[in-house]
Image (cartoon, rainbow, N blue to C red):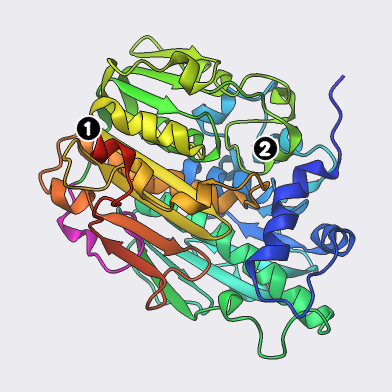
């Protein structure tokens, strides 16, 4: 019989201890106790908000915060999207899903505001219940097809389109704002831990706008509206980890997908993985990571799984139209770079730092092994928070889809994105540029 412990919070706790400048890091015991006390209200009353966006937010939050109330005056507001129904053992709504992920949590749904006071209220779309809510902080989400807006002040009325990548981005950025709100509460409650001038990385911005291509600095108005159905090129997923599985999740939950892909990963899902693997529940602990992909095979999408190390399976003569890589091991990254492929999309995170890059076979450009080599030499457990991994996966999925649909401005996609995801909109925290090969790169040296 599978049982859950507080290990599900392990990576989130490590992230909190390491991601900001504390006077002294709070203990695991203190953080865990405060996580259970941190009360979140998610207002899901607006039926124009896609069910997948609502589910994204609930799915991300329930993996890190065990005290969550979902408010909807319409019973259809809490229905699970189809991609979640394939992973849950019984019919139910989003509250039932949260308990499948974290059975010890306190998750509830309500059709009225009530008299409770929350630490954070997150409002998706319509503001008609805002005046009835009592919360220390309120966060408002809006989206257009490619863009997202996150605000701590109630914005004016604006037309929204929640059906594109912008809606998914708004939910992911709300997850990142939630961890910042939680850290700010620790600073207020225990001022001896946090600097008096509140750590820079967790300050709230009144309003921040984001793009689904590179977070900041690029207008998405030139990007096309995407078809409902897409055919992906023959794709190889190296790693069944949080980033690649998130990219897979966003792809399948947004589009009717045809094509073929292969997923390679030797590892099993453990309890700490639950904080960031979006398609897993407690019932998946102990199963191969590649099973996450296989169960979403369909009559139009062929999925092959390889539960072994990449080096055991890899053959330098192999070719692939498209590679999605989320692997940390530097030798694996070099081996991937030696393959013949059309395009390779790479994703990596460390604390709140995120790297997303697209590579072709041009020897004059950086390969996957040229980027942040030092970051992949450590055997330390990576302190990761679910929405950061989800954000990296979302940005990888954007590139996957644009390349699959033959987006004309390919040179735009070949730029590498580096971002500090706690404050990506601030100047200097997001860098988007073309990277040159490292002089020590073994791949380039042997060409």
Q: Is residue 146 left or right of residue 291?
A: left
Where is residue 311 shown, x and y percent of the image? 47, 21
Q: Is residue 95 left or right of residue 105?
A: left
Please tell me which of labels 2 and 1 falls first in the chain: 2
Where, by quadrant of the figure, is residue 5 drawn?
A: top right
Circle 2 sits on which residue? 273
**Magenta stretch prevailing secondary structure:** loop
Nearest the viewer among 119 and 269 is 269
Where is residue 37 shown, x and y percent of the image? 84, 62
Q: Which quarter of the rendered picture does the N terminus lie within?
A: top right
Q: Residue furthest top?
A: 299
Q: Secondary structure at mark 2?
A: helix
- At x 40%, y 18%, the residue is 314
Where, by quadrant of the figure, is residue 176 drawn?
A: bottom right
**Disc 2 crowd, CA 10 A, few/some/many (<14, 14-19, 20+):** many
Q: Which quarter of the rendered picture does the C terminus lie within?
A: top left
- The span picked out in magenta is 211-224
Q: Secondary structure at mark 1?
A: helix
- At x 41%, y 36%, the residue is 333
Q: Residue furthest bottom?
A: 196
Q: Is residue 166 left or right of residue 197?
A: left
């Amino acid at each position: 019989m599978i049982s859950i412990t507080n290990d599900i919070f392990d990576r989130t706790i490590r992230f909190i201890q390491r991601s900001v400048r504390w006077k002294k890091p709070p203990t695991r015991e203190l953080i865990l106790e405060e996580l259970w006390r941190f009360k979140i209200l998610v207002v899901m009353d607006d039926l124009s908000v896609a069910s997948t966006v609502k589910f994204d937010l609930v799915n991300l939050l329930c993996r890190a915060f065990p005290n969550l109330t979902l408010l909807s005056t319409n019973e259809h507001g809490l229905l699970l999207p189809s991609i979640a129904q394939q992973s849950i053992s019984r019919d139910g709504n989003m509250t039932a899903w949260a308990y499948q992920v974290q059975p010890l949590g306190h998750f509830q749904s309500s059709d009225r505001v009530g008299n409770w006071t929350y630490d954070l209220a997150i409002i998706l779309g319509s503001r008609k219940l805002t005046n009835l809510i009592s919360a220390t902080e309120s966060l408002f989400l809006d989206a257009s097809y490619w863009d997202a807006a996150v605000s701590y002040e109630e914005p004016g009325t604006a037309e929204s389109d929640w059906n594109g990548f912008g809606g998914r981005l708004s939910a992911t950025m709300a997850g990142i704002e939630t961890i910042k709100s939680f850290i700010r509460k620790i600073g207020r409650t225990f001022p001896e831990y946090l600097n008096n001038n509140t750590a820079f990385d967790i300050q709230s911005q009144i309003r921040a706008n984001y793009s689904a291509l590179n977070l900041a600095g690029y207008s998405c108005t030139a990007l096309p509206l995407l078809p409902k159905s897409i055919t992906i090129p023959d794709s190889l997923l190296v790693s069944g980890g949080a980033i690649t599985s998130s990219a897979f999740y966003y792809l399948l939950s947004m589009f009717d997908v045809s094509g073929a892909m292969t997923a390679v990963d030797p590892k099993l899902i453990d309890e700490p993985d639950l904080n960031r693997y979006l398609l897993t529940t407690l019932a998946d602990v102990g199963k191969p990571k590649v099973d996450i992909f296989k169960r979403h095979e369909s009559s139009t999408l062929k999925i092959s799984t390889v539960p072994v190390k990449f080096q055991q399976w890899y053959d330098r003569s192999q070719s692939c139209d498209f590679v999605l890589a989320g692997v940390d091991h530097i030798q694996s990254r070099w081996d991937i770079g030696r393959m013949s492929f059309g395009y390779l999309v790479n994703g990596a995170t460390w604390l709140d730092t995120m790297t997303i890059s697209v590579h072709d076979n041009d020897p004059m450009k950086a390969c996957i092994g040229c980027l942040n080599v030092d970051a992949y030499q450590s055997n330390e457990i990576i302190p990761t928070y679910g929405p950061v991994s989800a954000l990296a996966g979302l940005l990888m999925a954007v590139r996957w889809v644009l390349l699959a649909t033959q987006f004309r401005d390919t040179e735009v996609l070949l730029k590498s994105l580096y971002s500090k995801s706690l404050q990506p909109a601030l100047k200097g925290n997001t860098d988007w540029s073309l990277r040159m090969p490292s002089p020590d790169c073994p791949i380039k040296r042997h060409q």
